[in-house]
Image (cartoon, helix red, strand yellow):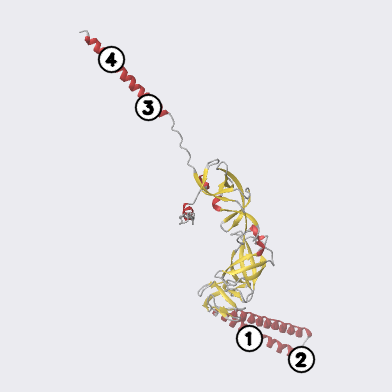
Amino acid sequence: MPALPLVRAVFARRGSLVTSAVAAAFAALAIAGCSHPAAPEEPLRAVKITTVGVSTFDTEPEFSAEVRARVESRIGFRVGGKITKRQVDMGQHVNAGQVLAQLDPQDFKLATDAARAQLAAATTNRDIAASDLKRYQGLRDQNFISGADLERRETTYKSAQAQFEQAQAQLSSQGNQANYTTLVADVPGIVTAIEAEPGQVVTSGTPVVRIAQDGARDVVFAVPEDRAALIKPGAPVTVRGWAGGAELEGKVREVAASADAVTRTYTVKVAIDAATAPALGATVYARPQSLSRSGTAVIKLPTSALRQEGQGSAVWVLDKDTMTVRLQAVQVATADGNAAVISGGITPGMMVVVAGVHVLQPGQKVSIYQDKNAIAAAPSPAPAAAVVPTAAGAKQ
């Protein structure tokens, strides 16, 4: 039996060794779980670069405009009533005196007839008063009546004469009212709008037809507030048609004194020759020469190079020595086509990132992007000439 305790001791020792090994393994796993993995290295980004240089404006400010008549009349009836007939359509040319629309004249005819009857009654009363006055004058000459009686007859005649003149004026006024039921064009021109239709009841002065008068034409466009002060009356303006054609020269006739309540822009009217003007209402483009900057030296960058930084704009500038980028604030003056005109913040010779500006960080290392297609399309160098020995041992 002495061997049994020895075996037990051996197994007990082995069990403690296994337990220690298991504990050590768990401790190693716990340590490994508590430690943070190493941060992956930031990838080296390839960016497109442009070298800042000085160029000139390529475009001139151009505004969309419309050809309008210098004088446009909104014509309406001088009396109220129901429209029974409209005799013109939009776009139709009308002459002075041409009938445009008609009101129901029945009430005005009745009023005219009543005024005519009143005039007839007043005429009769005046004639009777005139006859009485003549007869009483004869009696007064023979001293058959007193002077007071004659004066009463004279007063009666004067009253009848006044009533006659009143009725005469009333008839004339009612005749005019009846004539006003016919709306006629007072000037030649083109109908540009119909603002009332037959069956509609209108009041006196309500616009019914709008007419663009024949004659002078204007090109009308709107400019923002910062440019309105640069355009003065008499300044030359070049006008070109939307569908092409020859360019026209005009002069600024009027600049609005106040901004439009809705658009907050200022209306500019340019006078052009009516003989060569495009059709009324045509769309044209106007280039005020006072706003032209052609030939002015400026620094321009693609709009893709700009990023919003706070309340301003900024670009990424490449340091060629360290191949890192830094953020540089810039001032944008205006736009020239699809490019931004920079007024400050960068100087010619700087290298600016023009693509991928929203994924960069200050101090980040980058590489310059190389277009694979451009590299593949580049011509390969010509092979060296082969050396062919000749019979004399010379080289060809």
For this rendering, which residue is in front, 42 or 128?
A: 42
Other-residue count near label 2 (Cα within 10 Å), few / some / many at <14 / 14–19 / ≥20: few
Residue pointed to by mark 2: 138
Q: Of callouts 1 and 4, which one flags the residue occurring earlier in the amino acid sequence?
A: 4
Q: Of callouts 4 and 2, which one flags the residue occurring earlier in the amino acid sequence?
A: 4
Residue pointed to by mark 4: 12
Q: Secondary structure at mark 3?
A: helix
Marks 2, 1: nearer the viewer: 1
Is label 2 in contact with label 1 (beta carbons under 8 Å)?
no
Residue pointed to by mark 3: 29
Marks 2, 3: nearer the viewer: 3
Please state the horizontal and vertical placement of residue 345, each as a whole percent of the image.
63, 48
The CA span between labels 3 and 1 is 128 Å
Amino acid found under the numbered disc labelled 4: Ala
Q: Secondary structure at mark 4?
A: helix
The CA span between labels 2 and 1 is 28 Å
Residue pointed to by mark 1: 120
Other-residue count near label 3 (Cα within 10 Å), few / some / many at <14 / 14–19 / ≥20: few
Check the image and report above or below for 130 versus 396.
below
Residue drawn at x 33%, y 21% is 21
Check the image and report above or below for 210 versus 35.
below
Question: What is the quadrant of residue 101 in the picture?
Answer: bottom right
Q: Secondary structure at mark 1?
A: helix
Marks 3, 1: nearer the viewer: 3
Is the N terminus in the top left, top right, bottom left or bottom right quadrant? top left
The CA span between labels 3 and 4 is 26 Å
Amino acid found under the numbered disc labelled 2: Gly
Q: Secondary structure at mark 2?
A: helix
The CA span between labels 2 and 3 is 151 Å
